[in-house]
């Protein structure tokens, strides 16, 4: 197998090109293997407007939807392992007031496992934040809204609901829960990669969550976590070291998904050369983590591709695949 230094040197090339051609302000690429060897490469700016700050190996990133797998999936599966919840039980076993005014509807039949695998009819996108900024009222709205059933798609609603179940079980908001070693719900603006100049919050977002719904809810199960490349590699190393105890995150629920994570399919973010025993996930802000159990290594690509705006073709989808293919080129 190619040594880790060679892997990261060749995989860094497309990231460097994306920064040099001004597609992305900056990024960090990290690789780790089962023996604990790791390497990091960094390039570009953590912030480009209105001030310039360089990207560093210790820059904190808004991890966006990586929250789903790093935090929410981990907690839900731990509760299932402890017997606190049944993955095949409906959410109403913990959230009895979910759609409480219509007891005979599809929403009340949705299970924890279906939410983990995005096997529900919830819409792909829903602008909850446009209904106000009262987090308690928004939670009530979410639970009582009559959702239109559609095809099963990747939906943040699944993990927002899982987050509400966690809050109900623990009797506190998500931001009062321990986010996990090396992670946080906010970051020091001087140490964080900037994201978007937000049109409805009227400020550049640095160290506070980019996701609109998570911001309005003041913490949610689908987004909000911050971390560094080293924190992500530490998390990946824990999975590589103890793969047997994490069988469910490797167990397929569909052609594209396991419990919480994605698995390889044609055109997926991890590229075409990883093994079939690989899981991965991405975040809207330009983040991602992939763990290949058969090859015994993992990699993370962290960028601030939405800075200063999301309305620009950063090429992030092709970049992720190119990096994955070069990581696994041997």
Image (cartoon, rainbow, N blue to C red):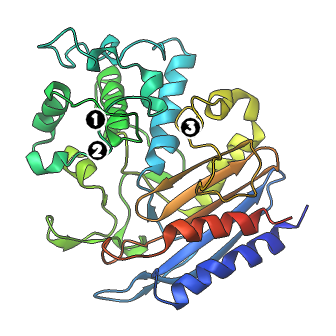
In-image side of 195 versus 27 (left or right) = left
The image shows residue 11 at horizontal and vertical percentages of 71, 73
Q: CA distance from mark 1 to mark 2?
A: 7 Å
Q: In terms of sequence position, does the residue under pointer 1 or pointer 3 come before the other? A: 1
Q: Residue 149: horizontal and vertical position, in percent?
A: 27, 29
Q: Residues within 10 Å of mark 1 (few under 14, many from 20)?
A: some
Residue 236 or 323: which is nearer the viewer?
Answer: 323
Q: Earlier in the sequence, mark 3 or mark 2?
A: 2
Residue in view at x 24 percent, y 49 percent: 213
Give the foreground label among 1 and 3: 3
Q: Contact, CB < 8 Å: mark 1 with mark 2?
A: yes
Residue with the mark numbered 1 = 173
Can you tell which mark lies on residue 219? 2
Seen from this angle, which residue lies furthest right? 1
SS class of the residue under badge 3? loop
Position of residue 316 relative to residue 221, above or below, is below
Residue 133 visible in the shown view: no
What percent of the width, then of the height, locates residue 48? 37, 86
- Residue at position x 59%, y 54% from top? 268
Return the residue at label 3.
257
């Amino acid at each position: 197998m190619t040594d880790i230094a060679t892997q990261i040197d060749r995989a860094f090339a497309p990231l460097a090109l994306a920064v040099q051609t001004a597609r992305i302000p900056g990024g960090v690429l990290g690789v780790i293997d089962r023996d604990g060897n790791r390497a990091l490469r960094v390039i570009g700016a953590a912030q480009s407007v209105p001030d310039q700050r360089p990207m560093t190996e210790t820059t904190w990133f808004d991890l966006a939807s990586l929250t789903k797998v790093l935090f929410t999936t981990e907690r839900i599966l731990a509760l299932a392992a402890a017997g606190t919840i049944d993955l095949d039980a409906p959410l109403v076993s913990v959230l009895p007031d979910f759609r409480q005014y219509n007891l005979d509807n599809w929403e009340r039949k949705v299970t924890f496992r279906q939410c983990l695998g995005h096997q529900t009819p919830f819409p792909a996108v829903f602008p909850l934040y446009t209904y106000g900024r009262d987090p308690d009222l928004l939670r009530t709205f979410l639970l009582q809204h009559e959702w239109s059933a559609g095809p099963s798609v990747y939906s943040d609603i699944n993990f927002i609901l899982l987050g509400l179940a966690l809050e109900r079980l623990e009797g506190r908001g998500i931001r009062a829960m321990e986010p996990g070693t090396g992670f946080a719900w906010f970051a020091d603006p001087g140490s964080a990669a900037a994201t978007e100049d937000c049109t409805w919050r009227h400020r550049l977002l640095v160290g506070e969550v980019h996701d609109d719904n998570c911001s309005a809810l003041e913490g949610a199960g689908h987004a909000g976590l911050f971390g560094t490349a080293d924190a992500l590699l530490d998390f990946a190393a824990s999975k590589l070291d103890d793969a047997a105890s994490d069988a469910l995150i490797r167990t397929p629920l569909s052609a594209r998904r396991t419990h919480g994570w994605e698995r390889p399919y044609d055109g997926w973010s991890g590229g075409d050369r990883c093994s079939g025993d690989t899981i991965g996930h991405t975040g809207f802000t330009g983040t991602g983590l992939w763990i290949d159990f058969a090859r015994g290594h993992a990699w993370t690509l962290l960028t601030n591709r939405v800075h200063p705006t999301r309305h620009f073709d950063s090429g992030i989808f092709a970049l992720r695949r190119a990096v994955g293919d070069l990581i696994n080129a041997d």
